[in-house]
Amino acid sequence: MVFLLRSVGRYAGLAACLFLLALPGLFAQTAGQSHASQSLLPAHFSGWAEQGVSHTGTEPAALDPGNSDVLSEYGLKNFATGVYRRGSAEARVRTMRFVDATGAYGAFTFYRKPDMDPAAIGNGGARGAHEVVFWSGTTVVDATFSGPQGPSTASLNALAKALPAASGRLGVAPSLPQYLPAKSLDELTVQYAIGPAAYTKSGGVLPASAVDFDRNAEAVTAQYSTSGGGGTLTLINYPTPQMAISAEKSIAALLKGPLPAGLQRSSPVALGVRRSGPIVAVTSGNFSGAEVQALLGQVRYQAEVTWSHSQGSMSEVKKAAEMLMGIAALTGILVAFALLMAAFLGGGRALWRVVRGKPASSVYEEDFISLNLSGWGPRAPRKLP
């Protein structure tokens, strides 16, 4: 027991250091295996089987040459395209993975068409006669199919579950669309943009220079149907309220001067602008004066809205608890590994000493230095050995 305790003390630190040196390699191997196991297109989903080998890439121009600038703004990481069959039915599936859920949601609104119907697929979907678009986590899926019937909603939800999952803040969708008033809103016309290319190509009515995306602004536009004829509501979110105050003044001056091309068909009474916190709301189209005031009055910024997302956000308390549990688990692993290594190394050393005819521990060695001070006192003469 004595030699084992001494060995633990001697080798525990060495074992812990060895484990810490090996830890980055273990994490890298685990991450590589996880990345390899999560491909953008599964071989099968709900009876649909992939035909041949899927085409993959990372360049936006290789996926959609006409909208490569849009994909770059949304932060495209990689993509995959493949063909699936189920009996005589065929579906061509295109998946696009983005840096975060913000880019995925924006790309979903860009590729979704107004004549589609809402579909409960993944985090949100839309379905047409021969096309389905939905998004899940940081991935967007655009599937076109031939024949009288394409993949069912249940089949597409199975595909959504097979896609790489997004965790933490990267999987949280943008909060700006939540500020759109729900009454009279045409949900399929919602367009979300974080850059001038996507905003212009998705039908933004304001000049991109007026939105000023260089200030990290984000914009969402939507169509509303009212008794007065309806129109467009544009919400622009800026990083700070001070930036929003400056933008509100610039847009108000724009609405009073010569109108840009996107606003020339608007009724003068339908043009309105109002700020709430860092959000600037702009109306255009054929709204009546009362409808403009009512619509703008419903846009109210709430600073605490970010913690109540339904798209998988996590409270700060839960984050702290999970971090502490992770630290405790890692500490337990390190201690257990250190004890095992110490027992192994110490036991092996003791066994080697016994085989050589020596005591199991060096504590029993006789060849150590001794001063032999027994019997010596302050007044007694010193007697050295």
Image (tube, rainbow, N blue to C red):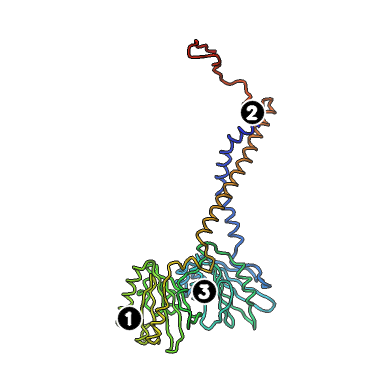
Does 359 sit above or below residue 385?
Answer: below
Find numbered disc 3 in the image and state the secondary structure of the residue it sits on: helix
Q: Which residue is mark 3?
A: 108
- On screen, residue 86 versus residue 21, left or right, reads right
Mark 3 or mark 2: whose residue is earlier in sequence: 3
In space, the residues marked 3 and 2 are separated at their CA atoms by: 70 Å
Q: Name the disc covering residue 361, or none.
A: 2
In space, the residues marked 3 and 1 are separated at their CA atoms by: 30 Å
Q: Residue at x 34, y 81 (%)?
A: 260
Q: Amino acid at mark 2?
A: Ser
Q: Nearer the viewer, residue 1 or 132?
A: 1
Q: Residue at x 60, y 75 (%)?
A: 92
Q: Name the disc covering residue 255, or none.
A: 1
Instruction: Rate crowding at label 1 as few (under 14), some (14 to 19) or many (20 or more) other CA atoms within 10 Å.
Output: some
Q: Name the disc covering residue 92, or none.
A: none
Q: Nearer the viewer, residue 44 or 241?
A: 241
Does 277 sit above or below residue 167?
Answer: below
Q: Nearer the viewer, mark 3 or mark 2?
A: 2
Q: Percent position (x, y) of residue 370? A: 56, 19
- On screen, residue 298 versus residue 37, left or right, reads left
Q: Nearer the viewer, residue 12 or 178?
A: 178
Q: Amino acid at mark 3?
A: Phe
In space, the residues marked 1 and 2 are separated at their CA atoms by: 90 Å
Does 371 sit above or below residue 27?
Answer: above
